[in-house]
Image (cartoon, helix red, strand yellow):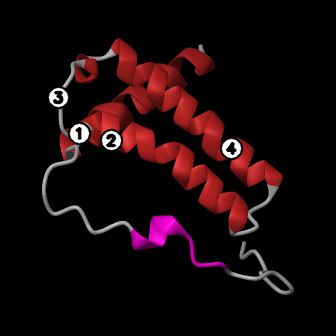
Amino acid sequence: MAISMKGKTNYKTTMNNIPKYREKMLIQTYLDLHDEFIRDKELENLSDRTIKDHIYIFKIFSKWLLASDWSYENQYVQKALFIDYKDYMINEKIMHHVQ
């Protein structure tokens, strides 16, 4: 289902200006960017529900991150981080809700 942007202004925000990270980014830097991301999404006129969903999903990710092996300082964001999180969501988080 497509969402219409009729009547809404599409603002260019600071998240659009972040340089493409070709070098490694610390996980903490990634987490720190979330508040700026949320602020920018609010400026882009996303619905309150969408903003709340972003915050909720990120909260789940953050809790998992703190409990995982990825929580050690000076770790970098990498593809394996998101593969591990996806595995958790599919095989642990969702399975607990089914049972």
Marking on residue 74: 3
Could you say whether the residue bearing mark 3 is in a helix, strand or loop?
loop
Q: In which quarter of the image is residue 39?
A: bottom right
Dot 4 falls on a residue whose secondary structure is helix
Q: Residue 26 carries which label?
A: 1
Q: In the displayed structure, would residue 99 be above or below residue 26?
A: above
Choose mark 4 or mark 1, whichever is in front: 1
Q: How far apart are marks 4 and 1 (CA)?
A: 24 Å
Location of residue 6 in the rendering, given as x and y in whole percent from the top left corner: 83, 86
Between marks 2 and 4, how big is the CA–CA gap? Answer: 21 Å
Amino acid on which the number 4 mark rests in the picture: Asp
In the image, 13 versus 52, the foreground residue is: 13
Labels 3 and 4 touching (C-beta < 8 A): no
> Secondary structure beneath disc 2?
helix
Asked whether, in this view, residue 53 is left or right of residue 59, the answer is right
Magenta range: 11-17
The kind of residue on which mark 3 rests is Asn
Q: Which label is found at residue 83?
A: none
Q: What residue type is labelled 1?
A: Leu
Kindly report the distance in space between the C-alpha atoms of the residues bearing marks 3 and 2.
10 Å
Kindly identify which residue carries mark 2.
29
Earlier sequence position, callout 3 versus callout 2? 2
Query: Mark 3 or mark 4: which comes first in sequence?
Result: 4
